[in-house]
Image: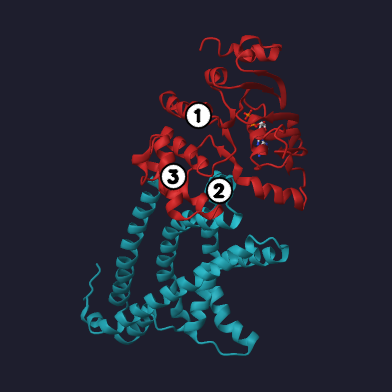
Amino acid sequence: MSSTSPLILADGVSKKFGINQVLTRVTLEVLERDVVCVVGPSGSGKTTLLRCLALLEEPSEGQVVMEGVPISTPSPDKQVKAAAREVRSEIGMVFQHFNLWPHMSVLQNLIEAPMRVKKMPRDKAVAIAESLLKKVDLFEKRDAYPARLSGGQQQRVAIARALAMSPKVLLFDEATSALDPELRREVLAVMRQLAREGMTMLVVTHEMGFARHVGTRTVFMDRGEIVEAAPGSAFFDAPQTERARRFLQQFADE
Amino acid sequence: MFKYQFRWDTVWGSFDFLMGGLQMTLIISAITLVLAMVGGLIIALLDMSRFRPLRWIGISIGEVVRNTPILVQLLWVYYVLPIVFGVRIEALVALIIGLALYQAAFISEVYRSGIQSVPKGHREAAQVLGLTPFQSFNRIVLPQAIRMTLPPLASNFVQLIKFSSLGAVISVSEITRRGMELSATNFRPLETFTFIAVVYFFICWPLAMAIRFWERRLQAR
Ligand SMILES: Nc1ncnc2c1ncn2[C@@H]1O[C@H](COP(=O)(O)OP(=O)(O)O)[C@@H](O)[C@H]1O
């Protein structure tokens, strides 16, 4: 694999639901150690793009490529499906509504995939899970069930669960929008720490502060298209289009 | 006014006879529940099958059974099946088959809604982490679905206790039938059937209350 090819790439991805065109030839590459933040008005297709990259949706056109290998195409052939299985767990995802499994304790949530998918021995999986729980500062909740945790704690567990598979890239789908403002901070802190440690991340978010200060690149989407992409805080300091300016206006008083 | 000399002793005199019938009622209900759980699973799998003919069979069974009276079904199993297959079916067997089929059609819906009660996001989380569809069903969907199905299954048991009284019509010797036989000899239908109604009530009511409590606790989770 050439080291210059992006870690993950949406290559001209379009997505239609029936006659509703949600994405129109979106091309977006994420390089190693990138923290790409995707912003834009709601309904602009951000989540759908993320779901295409997470292999939860099949593109209607274009392809998703991981380290040079196509892993998702419209009606994929055997080769693409095999490639997808191969890298499946290297693409982690954190959902807006956490999606922890309520019938399992926090620890079980974390060791389930490593044990079943990677066939990791239990004690090794537990050791990894415990160190991840310490990292998100929830070690003492190890045996609690998700329903006993606050939203912020649940989301931190969900992040730890994703990390337990040591993914190469982590996708965040509005990971803080279901949370009260006080609880957002603890989740954003974990995300910031991951960025600092060099985790490759693609973050769909309404947190402009995070995008501005933590993101290495900001992508602005509107009506299914990428309208602007700029490194670091450049997008916020000098938006190029009227649409972006109007979008940023709403956050002016923040 | 209503002047009536109650003769409860005629009922106490046959207490063991009636309790033997109750035992029969409970055994029939238990066996039928087990069969109906298996039958319900088969119907649910047929319903969800990828092959259209199988799906069609599953849906047809469900619709026919749910939309004809249970008593007619019992009579059909008891009188018609032997003609069609040329074998005599014992009343008890006919009752169990008929009730099990009837409950299975409802239980298949219980299973289906149990599975549908598991949010799609739980499966997507499993998928993203690399679990196969089978692992995801087995480890994530099924344990949650089963928890949701247990109270409705218990309610089905209560229903079966009541429905099994229909066995009286085809002379299965459960408690209602024994009541009919007793009142035909003691000429005391009032005492006899009142007693039987009370017996049913004090079995079904506490069960129903316990189930309602159980369901509320599950929802609170
Ligand atoms: N599974 C689906 N079926 C039909 N339409 C969908 C589906 N998922 C998303 N959409 C539509 O796609 C559009 C973009 O949605 P989304 O990607 O969630 O945007 P955003 O994340 O930017 O708010 C919306 O109009 C939404 O109704």
Q: Do discs 2 and 3 belong to a common subunit?
A: no
* Some atom of ligand 1 lies within 8 Å of the CB belonging to the residue at label 1: no
Amino acid on which the number 3 mark rests in the picture = Ala
Where does the image place residue A39, in percent across and percent down from the top left?
Answer: 62, 23
Q: Position of residue A162 (x, y in %)?
A: 52, 41
* Residue beneath disc 2: B126
Going by the numbered disc 1, the residue's amino acid type is Met
Which mark is on residue A191? Answer: 1
Say which colour chain B has. cyan
Q: CA distance from mark 1 to mark 3?
A: 18 Å
Residue at 69% over, 14% down = A243
Q: Chain of mark 3?
A: A
Q: Chain of mark 1?
A: A
Q: Earlier in the sequence, mark 1 or mark 3?
A: 3
Total labels: the figure holds: 3
Residue located beneath label 3 in the image? A129
- Where disc 2 sits, the SS reads helix
